[in-house]
């Protein structure tokens, strides 16, 4: 693990951060599952067998997956815009963000002396 002292390095991804396995599929999966849950709830609300009308479950699940993909894209756009604004601010005001030396926990924490 490399040390990052420069604040601009924290806001840039130069291929050193890999997304987790569930990262790209979590929101579409969760929203698709919620869509199927809505179909089950609608059937329950109309006092029909909860698994009747399988095409409705498939349709609501597909709509949920599409909504999850859309929400992922919107979140990524928002985070990219936020990082760009922060990066630009740091570039304009480098005096507010000095490069700090790394310290170990032993240097930061005070020594502990038990009181008995």
Image (spheres, helix red, strand yellow):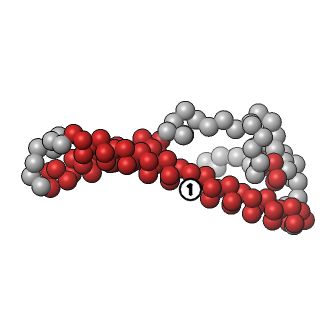
- The vertical placement of 7 against 19, above or below, is below
Identify the secondary structure beneath mark 1: helix
Q: Report the side of 37 relative to 24 (left or right).
A: left
- x and y percentages locating residue 78 in the rendered image: 62, 59
Going 21% across and 39% down the picture, which residue do you hit? 54
- x and y percentages locating residue 46 in the rendered image: 12, 55
Q: Residue furthest right?
A: 95
Q: Residue furthest left?
A: 47
* Residue that numbered label 1 is attached to: 74
| Crowd class of label 1 (few under 14; some 14 to 19; many from 20; radius 10 Å) | few
Q: Report the side of 111 relative to 5 (left or right).
A: left
Going 49% across and 47% down the picture, which residue do you hit? 69
- Assign the N terminus to one quadrant of the image: top right
The number of numbered badges drawn on the structure is 1
Viewer-side residue, 17 vs 71: 71
Viewer-side residue, 17 vs 98: 17
Viewer-side residue, 9 vs 25: 25
Going 85% across and 50% down the picture, which residue do you hit? 6
Going 81% across and 62% down the picture, which residue do you hit? 88
Residue 30 shows up from this direction:
no
- x and y percentages locating residue 65 in the rendered image: 42, 45
Q: Report the side of 65 relative to 19 (left or right).
A: left
- x and y percentages locating residue 92 in the rendered image: 87, 66
Residue 1 shows up from this direction:
yes
Viewer-side residue, 3 vs 11: 11
């Amino acid at each position: 693990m490399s040390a990052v002292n420069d604040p601009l390095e924290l806001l840039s991804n130069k291929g050193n951060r890999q997304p987790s396995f569930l990262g790209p599929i979590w929101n579409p999966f969760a929203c698709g599952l919620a869509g199927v849950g809505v179909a089950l709830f609608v059937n329950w609300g109309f006092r029909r067998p909860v698994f009747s009308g399988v095409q409705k479950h498939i349709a609501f699940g597909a709509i949920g997956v599409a909504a999850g993909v859309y929400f992922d894209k919107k979140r990524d756009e928002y985070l990219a815009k936020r990082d760009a604004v922060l990066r630009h601010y740091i570039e304009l005001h480098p005096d507010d963000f000095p490069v700090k030396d790394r310290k170990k926990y032993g240097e930061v924490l005070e020594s502990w002396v038990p009181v008995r």
